[in-house]
Amino acid sequence: MAPITSGPVDPSAPLVKKPISWNNLALGAALNLFEVSSLGQPFEVLKTQMAANRSQSILTAIKSVWQRGGVFGFYQGLIPWAWIEGSTKGAVLLFTASESEYYARAAGASPFMAGIFGGMTGGIAQAYSTMGFCTFMKTVEVTRSKAGAQVSTLKIASDIFKKEGFAGINKGVNAVAVRQCTNWASRFGITRYTQDAIIKARYGEGPDAHKKATALDKGLASVAGGALSCWNQPIEVIRIEMQSQVQTPGRPKNLTIVKAFKYIYSEHGARGLFKGVVPRIGLGIWQTVCMVALGKYSLKWHEHYLTFIF
């Protein structure tokens, strides 16, 4: 996720293809690493714990994670998998979404629809580049048994690759793609729609209304987009179930998206498909705080200093 620093789209403005700034990509990677290394990974671990162990309440899940390593239990999978994911996914999203949105606008799509299309293609590109195997290994770290002799996460990844190949290390990648596609389509679309609604309510519909939007307007819209895009939590629970190492009696083998959905629904009903949604909403809000608030102020610093590095 790159820093959200651009303003709302003025539908009356001429269409211009925005260049990709390598400085912005580097800043986005740095902000992603800060986000995941602070509160991001604890939210991710708690979400995974609840989705993989659907009988647990949020308090029970917190206790279970704590028992696996105290404070460090909440950072399972951070190094190297979350760091690899965090340092690459923003660049993939920004480049792919920017290109897709431009060509959608050029083909006649509205800013709202072009934003949704850009989010969809960017999310899919994320899943099939680095997020597939990183997400899988993060889930493995949270759900595998850690009793007995300790085995490094790299050794586990190596063993899985030797045994099952590329498909094994990317288990559940199609569910990741569906999640990312629907998540970013929703996030881009809802954020854009909310921004336009805020601007219309505060500044009217004049030709200069979009230019009056503040960072607070953008931040509120981004928070709404991050929280409301969690409507697709069922596919996230399905993704975690497909990648989970929890050994449950009666659990089908070789799970597909459809098989996982049927299994989860038969065991825990509709509520089971939304387990972990609260920490996921918290994660979405924290990402927004990092990318919008910190992104804004970091960009000012970066424009003065990072230019000399590249």
Image: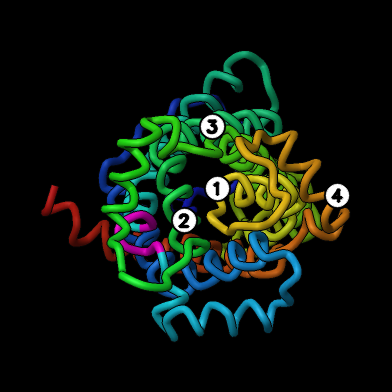
Q: Secondary structure at mark 2?
A: helix
The residue tagged 2 is 140
Query: What amino acid is at disc 3?
Result: Ile
| Label 1 or label 2, whichever comes before in sequence order | 2
Measure how far apart labels 4 and 2 are at the Cα level.
Answer: 24 Å
Query: What amino acid is at disc 4?
Result: Ser
Q: Is residue 216 visible?
A: no
Q: Residue at x 55, y 29 (%)?
A: 121
Q: Are marks 1 and 4 in contact (CB under 8 Å)?
A: no
Which stretch did the figure color magenta?
77-82
Select label 4 or label 3 by which is in front.
4
Measure how far apart labels 4 and 3 are at the Cα level.
Answer: 29 Å
The residue tagged 3 is 124
Measure how far apart labels 3 and 2 are at the Cα level.
Answer: 22 Å
User: Is residue 23 left or right of 147 when viewed as pictured?
Assistant: left
Q: Are marks 1 and 2 in contact (CB under 8 Å)?
A: yes
| Label 3 or label 2, whichever comes before in sequence order | 3
How far across and down, in percent of the image, does residue 119 sit? 59, 36
Res 243 label: 1
Q: Judge whether residue 209 is colored magenta.
A: no
Q: Are marks 3 and 2 in contact (CB under 8 Å)?
A: no
Q: Is residue 141 above or below residue 171?
A: below
Q: Residues within 10 Å of mark 4 (few under 14, many from 20)?
A: few
| Label 1 or label 4, whichever comes before in sequence order | 1
Q: Judge whether residue 79 is colored magenta.
A: yes
| Label 4 or label 2, whichever comes before in sequence order | 2
User: Is residue 134 left or right of 207 when viewed as pictured?
Assistant: left
Q: Residue at x 51, y 34 (%)?
A: 122
Q: Residues within 10 Å of mark 3 (few under 14, many from 20)?
A: many
Res 266 label: 4
Q: Is residue 235 above or below residue 149?
A: above
Measure how far apart labels 1 and 2 are at the Cα level.
Answer: 7 Å
